Amino acid sequence: MLRASARRLNAAKSCALIGGRGVCTAVDAPPLPTRLLISHRNDGVASISLNNRPVNALTHQVCTDLRVAIHELEADSSVRGLILASALPNLFSAGLDIRAFYKPDIEALAAYWTAVQELWLALYTTDLATVAAISGHSPAGGCLLALSCDHRVMVAGSYGIGLNEAKLGITAPPWFSKLLANRMGPRPAERMLMLGELLSPDEALAAGLVDEVVSLAGLNNAVAARMAELLAVNEKGRVSIKRQLREEAATELRERQSEDLDWFIHVVQQEDVQASLGVYLESLKKKPKDE
C-alpha cells in the first residue's frame, strides 16, 4: 500500500462545496508556514486550530500535520485532552481538497487518500478526550473530523454541517457513512447521504449530529466545560469504553485499507465524476475571490 508522504501540496486556489455554493479563493501569497497551530497546552488540555486559508481545506499536508500532532500529544503524558478548532472565522473546515480529485496523478491521489485514512484512524481512536469546537461551516471532510471527536459543540448561525459528497457525484466511503449512521441513526443518515444535505446547527442538534449549539461568544466556555466533564471521569474507564465502542470500525478500515484505497481511486476516475468535478471547478472561476 502506498503510504502518505510529507510533501506539501501547493495549489493556485483552494476550493470546497458548501451548501451548493462554491467557496474558492485565489492564493496570491505563499502559504502560511504553519498550517496547524497548537495554541497552548494548559492543565492537561491541548488546542489545535486549523489555519489553512482560505477555507481550511484538508489537503495532504494538513492531514499529515494533524495526524503527527495527535501522535505527539499522545506521547506527552501531561496531555489528556484535545480541543480541535478553527483559526478562521465562520468556518470549521470546508472538507477535503477537491482539486486533488480532478484529473489526478494516481500516485499523488493514492498518497493523499492514505493520508486521509490515517488521519481519521488517529483522531477516531486516540485515547485523548476530544472536543470539536465547530465555529462555522463544516461540510464533508470537516463534518468527518467533527464526528470523530467525543463531543461536538457548534455555534448558532447560518451554517451547514453534513456529508454532502453526493452533490458532486462522489460516494462517501463506508467508514464515512457508517460513522454518520452511528451518530444520527440509519434512516436520517441515509437521507443526508443520498441527497447531499447539510443541516443547520439546530437541525444538527435535533438529529444528534452535534451535541450542543451555543452562541459564538459562549463557544470557548462551552467547549471547556465539556472537556472538563470528560476529564472528570475515571480515565481508565473512559478510555476502555471508547476503545470498546470504536475498535470495530477502526479495525474494519485497517483490514481493508488497500481495498478502500483502490475503491476510492476507481470512484474518482469515473468519467461522470470527472465531468461533474470539471463543471464545478469551472463554475468557481466565475465567482468573486471572496466567496
Image (spheres, grey):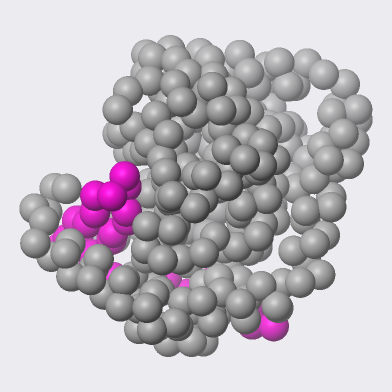
Residue 26, percent from left and from top? 17, 60
Q: Residue at x 37, y 63 (%)?
A: 168
Number of marks in the image?
Answer: 0
Quadrant that contains the N terminus: bottom right
Residue 17 falls within the magenta-colored stretch? yes
| The quadrant where residue 157 appears | top left
Q: Is residue 260 above or below residue 129?
A: below
In front: 129, or 154?
Answer: 154
| The quadrant where residue 120 appears | bottom right
Q: Residue at x 44, y 21 (%)?
A: 202
Is 22 situated left or right of 10 in this image?
left
Residue 111, percent from left and from top? 55, 77
Q: Residue at x 11, y 56 (%)?
A: 287
Q: Is residue 97 above or below residue 274?
A: above
Is 43 situated left or right of 214 in this image?
right
Is 177 situated left or right of 198 in this image?
right
Is 110 situated left or right of 290 in this image?
right
In front: 51, or 55?
Answer: 55
Residue 100 falls within the magenta-colored stretch? no
In this orientation, does residue 35 appear? no
Q: Residue at x 73, y 22 (%)?
A: 230
In this orientation, does residue 287 appear? yes
Q: Which residues are magenta?
A: 1-29
Residue 84, percent from left and from top? 54, 37
Residue 71, percent from left and from top? 69, 52
Q: Is residue 24 above or below residue 47?
A: below
In front: 136, or 87?
Answer: 136
